[in-house]
């Protein structure tokens, strides 16, 4: 199966450097325009289905992408962005040094989801899709952290949580193509 992994279009909070987490923000005008441009670029790709995080910014991205395809859109909670706990809605620039360390370590009392938990969700999604997906070509629309973890799993990259090298960046509205038939088997056995 071919899996096209996409990060949602930009939001006002993305543009302002505000942590979103699981907030239900919409795309900004710029996000709509960039997603429309990507939709036109991928209009010749014959997607069979779109899998999407249930948050508004991903669903709006899916709606724009699907205008070119008219395929089933399937919500999947495993594609939700990592929970940013007490930092959701906070400007990254306004954090104290202590808060920056708490956010980086995802420490107790922060209400944040661990990176390990988010990676487990991404791995479960890939395993499930590899074993049970009835489609040959899917578009998966999610968020930066989860998109990065999907990439790790799909490429067989071992994640090292001690170095933070596991955090891969997907630009807003960026799409990367992966072939699930080429996933290293050790990745799915971890």
Image (tube, rainbow, N blue to C red):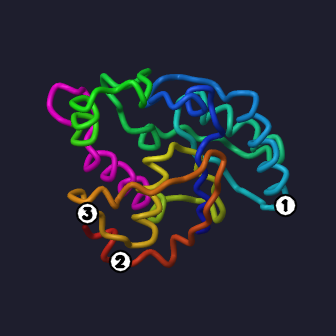
Tally of numbered tags: 3
Residue marked by disc 1? 44
Quadrant hosting residue 135:
bottom right
Numbered disc 1: secondary structure: loop
Labels 3, 2: front one: 3
Quadrant hosting residue 9:
top right
Bin the neighbour count of mark 3 within 10 Å (Cα to Cα): few under 14, some 14-19, many 20 and up.
few
Q: Image point 61% across, 67% down: which residue?
A: 2
Labels 1, 3: front one: 3
Percent x, y of residue 154: 45, 67
Residue marked by disc 2? 185
* Mark number displayed over residue 160: 3
In the displayed structure, does residue 83 sit left or right of residue 107? right
In the displayed structure, does residue 72 sit left or right of residue 186? right
Q: Image point 54% across, 37% down: which residue?
A: 75
Percent x, y of residue 18: 48, 27
Numbered disc 2: secondary structure: helix
Seen from the viewer's position, the closer of residues 153 and 91 is 91
Task: Give me the C-alpha separation between circle 2 and circle 1.
Answer: 31 Å
Mark 2 or mark 1, earlier in chain: 1
In the rendered image of this protein, does residue 79 appear above or below residue 156?
Answer: above
Magenta stretch: residue 39 in it? Answer: no
Mark 1 or mark 3, earlier in chain: 1
Q: Are marks 3 and 2 in contact (CB under 8 Å)?
A: no
* Mark number displayed over residue 32: none
> Which quarter of the rendering shows the N terminus?
bottom right
Q: Which residues are drawn in magenta?
A: 107-128
Q: Image point 49% across, 52% down: which residue?
A: 147
Percent x, y of residue 27: 67, 29
């Amino acid at each position: 199966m071919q899996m096209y992994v996409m990060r949602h279009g930009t939001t006002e909070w993305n543009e302002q450097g505000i942590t979103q987490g699981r907030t239900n923000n919409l795309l900004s005008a710029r996000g709509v325009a960039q997603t429309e441009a990507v939709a036109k670029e991928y209009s010749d790709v014959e997607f069979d289905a779109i899998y999407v995080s249930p948050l508004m910014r991903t669903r709006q991205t899916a709606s724009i992408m699907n205008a070119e395809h008219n395929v089933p859109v399937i919500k999947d909670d495993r594609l939700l962005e990592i929970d940013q706990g007490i930092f959701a809605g906070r400007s990254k620039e306004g954090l104290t040094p202590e808060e920056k360390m708490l956010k980086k370590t995802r420490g107790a009392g922060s209400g944040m989801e661990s990176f390990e938990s988010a990676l487990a969700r991404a791995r479960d999604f890939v395993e499930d899709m590899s074993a049970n997906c009835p489609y040959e070509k899917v578009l998966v629309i999610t968020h930066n952290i989860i998109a990065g973890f999907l990439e790790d799993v799909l490429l067989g990259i071992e994640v090292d949580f001690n170095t933070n090298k596991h955090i891969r960046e997907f630009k807003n509205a960026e799409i990367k193509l992966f072939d699930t038939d080429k996933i290293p088997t050790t990745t799915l056995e971890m």
